[in-house]
Image (spheres, rainbow, N blue to C red):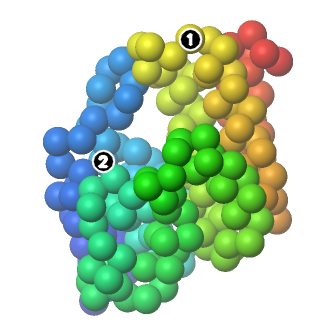
Amino acid sequence: MSDAALLLEAATFAAQRHAGQLRKGAERTPYINHPLEVARLLASVGNISEIDVLRGALLHDTVEDTGTKPEELEERFGPTVRRLVEEVTDDKSLPKARRKELQVEHTPHISVGAKQIKLGDKISNVVDVTDHPPSDWPIERRREYLDWTEAVVAGCRGANPALERHYDEVLSAGRRTLGAA
């Protein structure tokens, strides 16, 4: 199968699994826009061409948010994609505060590919929280979210300088917008 076909297979699977899901922002955009944006950031900003990392980016929220089983990802996309997705997947059985702590603790120990996916995810989320936040998020919660992403991204440093620079720019712009520069 060609690289393009492999990517489109993952995008189609992600779109099917995220069907009907919406982002938390006030605009309630289709959820699939997020994994597509993460993969786009990796390819265009991070200059990543490794197909399994890009497929992992497209599929990064399927286990966490759609009930997809890791075994299913391995069967369809192979063990590398499964591992990448599992590395960036939160354990939803834990309280939210603990999941956030674990991301900070765990991220320095994940693979380079998973760190790149995590960087793309945090870039996309910072832009959304800054420019398209959930309507019930006060400015202080948005600022706290940006601070938390900085702690997570600290564990990604060294994985992709271009993505890291882009994250720093997005974070700075977000802090200016939210009055926390």
Q: Nearer the viewer, residue 53 or 106?
A: 106
Categorize mark 2 by other alpha carbons within 10 Å: few (<14), some (14-19), many (20+): many
Give the residue number, with chain letter if any, for mark 2.
32
> Can you say whether 133 is above or below 109 in the image?
above
Q: Earlier in the sequence, mark 2 or mark 1?
A: 2
Q: Which residue sits at x=27%, y=56%?
A: 66
Q: Is residue 45 left or right of residue 9?
A: right
Single out the mark in the foreground, 2 or 1: 1
> Can you say whether 77 is above or below 114 in the image?
below
> Can you say whether 148 is above or below 116 in the image?
above
- Residue 69: quarter of image: bottom left
Give the residue number, with chain letter if any, for mark 1.
138
For residue 144, say whether it is visible. yes
For residue 39, say whether it is visible. no
Q: Nearer the viewer, residue 104 or 126?
A: 104
Q: Which residue sits at x=56%, y=31%?
A: 127
Q: Nearer the viewer, residue 1 or 111?
A: 111
Q: Quadrant of the N terminus?
A: bottom left
Q: How many marks?
A: 2
User: Residue 179's spot in the image, x, y percent?
Assistant: 75, 10
Q: Quadrant of the C terminus?
A: top right
**Secondary structure under the numbered disc 2 in the rendered image:** loop
